[in-house]
Image: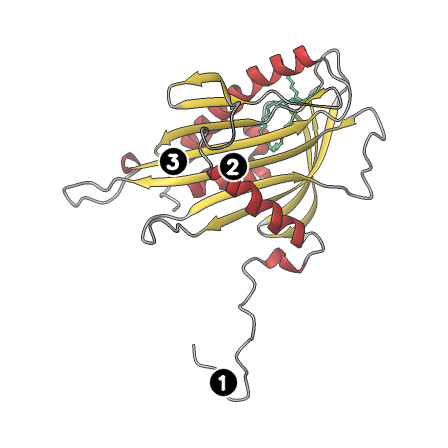
Amino acid sequence: ERLKSGQVMPVTPPPTSPACQHRLWPEIDKVVQQQVAMARMGIGECGSGWQLFAEDGEMKMYRREEELDGMVVDPLKAVHVVKGITGHEVCHYFFTPQYRYDWETTLEQMNVLETISDDTLMFMQTHKRIWPASQRDVVFWSHIRKLPNEKDRDGPDIWTVVNNSTEHPDYPANNGKCVRIFLKVCLMCQTRVDPPKDGTPLSRENVSCKITYCSVVNPGGWAPASVLRAVYKREYPKFLKRFTAYIINQTKNKPIMF
Ligand code: 16C
């Protein structure tokens, strides 16, 4: 676009996200870049120690056994390929609060504490109690972003949602019946398109989504290691299967959102 007379060309490019005015922005941008770089690494490249603990069709889940001050903080990395949905759709349903109770089975209550911008929210969640541990809650920012596809400039963009624990003065940790957990989660989605050979229009048959989900959850306080590992071995596969089935169901009669 041409500049009107008297207008000067801006020295810095326009902000890429409206959230960039917020106090948390430097942290958000840094953590998103780090998490995406980690998610992009293959299982073999991430350093040794990834063990496969669950597999179902295309879905594979790996963990590394790690402890911090005697607490289990095993990092998790899951990969899945799902037909008929796009990366933008997967990230949209993961990020948007209105759908969360539909797919998040461990959730007891969710509140949006702050709308930082359209692509960045702050959440407070309480999760179901696991016997014999105390109930857990968590406060985190969540940011959705489209990343340009550097390998294939004409190909679909990569979409990501990063969730990262933060603090909120009105919701101090360990103040009531809940123990505060700390998490770092990255969902990264790449869309693959295989156009029909005969020139017919693209349909959901022609798209699939490669999902990478990485998380580290620190339970924040005592919980028996054996119970914790048994719970996540059951809950992570349940989450990814239920969540992807939900998106397939939600999108089946809707236009494809690239
Ligand atoms: O990433 C996911 N969800 C996002 C939106 O909600 C967000 C939140 C993640 C919270 C994950 C921690 C929840 C653990 C709470 C306790 C589990 C209760 C189980 C109750 C069973 C009756 O990023 C998808 C998250 C999928 C969660 C799978 C469960 C992981 C368990 C990890 C162990 C937590 C330690 C709990 C200590 C008692």
Q: Residue at x 36, y 43 (%)?
A: 256
Picture coordinates of residue 194 (x, y %)? 25, 39
Q: Residue at x 61, y 45 (%)?
A: 31
Picture coordinates of residue 199 (x, y %)? 16, 46
Outermost residue, bottom direction? Answer: 5
Give the residue type at disc 1. Lys
Quarter of the figure with residue 222 = top right
Give the residue type at disc 2. Leu
* 24, above or below 111, in the image: below
Give the residue type at disc 3. Cys
Q: Secondary structure at mark 3?
A: strand
Split into quadrants, the picture shows ligand 1 in the one at top right
Picture coordinates of residue 177 (x, y %)? 82, 24
| Ligand 1 lies under 8 Å from the Cβ of mark 2 | yes
| Ligand 1 lies under 8 Å from the Cβ of mark 3 | no
**Of residues 18 and 103, which is closer to you in this image?**
18
Q: How crowded is the residue under tag 3: few (<14 C-alpha within 10 Å), some, or many (20+)?
A: many
Residue that mark 1 sits on: 4
Could you tell me how far apart the alpha carbons at marks 1 and 3 are, in whole angstroms?
44 Å
* Nearest to N terminus: mark 1 or mark 3: 1
Residue that mark 2 sits on: 187
Residue that mark 3 sits on: 209
Left or right: where 73 falls relative to 209: right
